[in-house]
Image (cartoon, grey):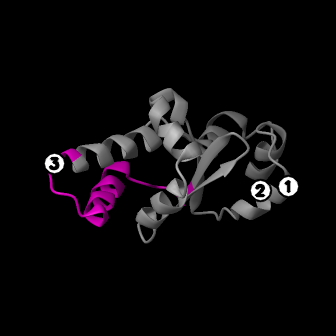
Amino acid sequence: MKIFRLGESYYCVMKKKYNLDKIKELYLKKAKVKKGSFAAEYVVTIFNNVFYNAVDLKKDYNDFYNDEYNSFNDFLYHKKLFSRKDIGDFDIHQEQTLLELNLNRNNYNTKTLFEYEDNFIKVFNEMLEGIDI
């Protein structure tokens, strides 16, 4: 699981059959915050703002665009306007999907953290490291 920025948008590569509640539980465990504390609530809020309105692009492709494009990579290239290089960099395997994170839809402050807080994406990805559900 890893979040990255491409242009003005944020994406996450993760397993195709993911469970956000289980991922959040493990994320909180890694954060080592006391249950019910302000820190725990803050961590949960950020996690929810990042993931709960995300669009599963592979699911969108399979549900709506499968007949229109030859492959998921063609869908990303033609519909989402990703470069071939970026598609190769994602290196999405059969058992993975690509989430388009809608940070603005959830909370402007979360997007601000990602854009302006030095190393925030790096720290967030370190917390996600090893969580592969």
Q: Secondary structure at mark 3?
A: loop
Q: Residue at x 37, y 50 (%)?
A: 20
The disc at residue 84 is 1
> For residue 37, which numbered disc appears in the image?
3
Judge depth for marks 2 and 3 and give the one in front: 3
Image quarter in which the C terminus is found: bottom left
Q: Secondary structure at mark 1?
A: helix
Crowd band around label 2 with a 10 angstrom C-alpha radius: few (<14), some (14–19), many (20+): some
Up the image or down, 112 lies above or below 125; here it is above
Question: What is the x, y in percent for residue 25?
Answer: 27, 56
Cα distance in 3D space between marks 2 and 3:
40 Å
In the rendered structure, which amino acid carries the disc numbered 1? Arg
Q: Amino acid at mark 2?
A: Ile
Asked whether the viewer can see residue 16, the reply is no
What residue is pinned by disc 2? 87
Along the polypeptide, which appears first: circle 3 or circle 1? 3
Q: Position of residue 116 (x, y in %)?
A: 57, 44
Does residue 32 show up magenta in the picture? yes
Q: Is residue 92 magenta?
A: no
Q: Residues within 10 Å of mark 3 (few under 14, many from 20)?
A: few
The 10 Å Cα crowd at callout 1, few under 14, some 14 to 19, many 20 or more, is: few
Please state the extent of the stretch shown in magenta in the rendering: 13-38
* Foreground pick, 44 / 18: 44
Relative to 63, 38 lies left or right: left
Confirm or deny contact between disc 1 and disc 2 (CB under 8 A): yes
| Foreground label between 3 and 1 | 3
Residue 56 rendering spot, x and y as whole percentages: 56, 43
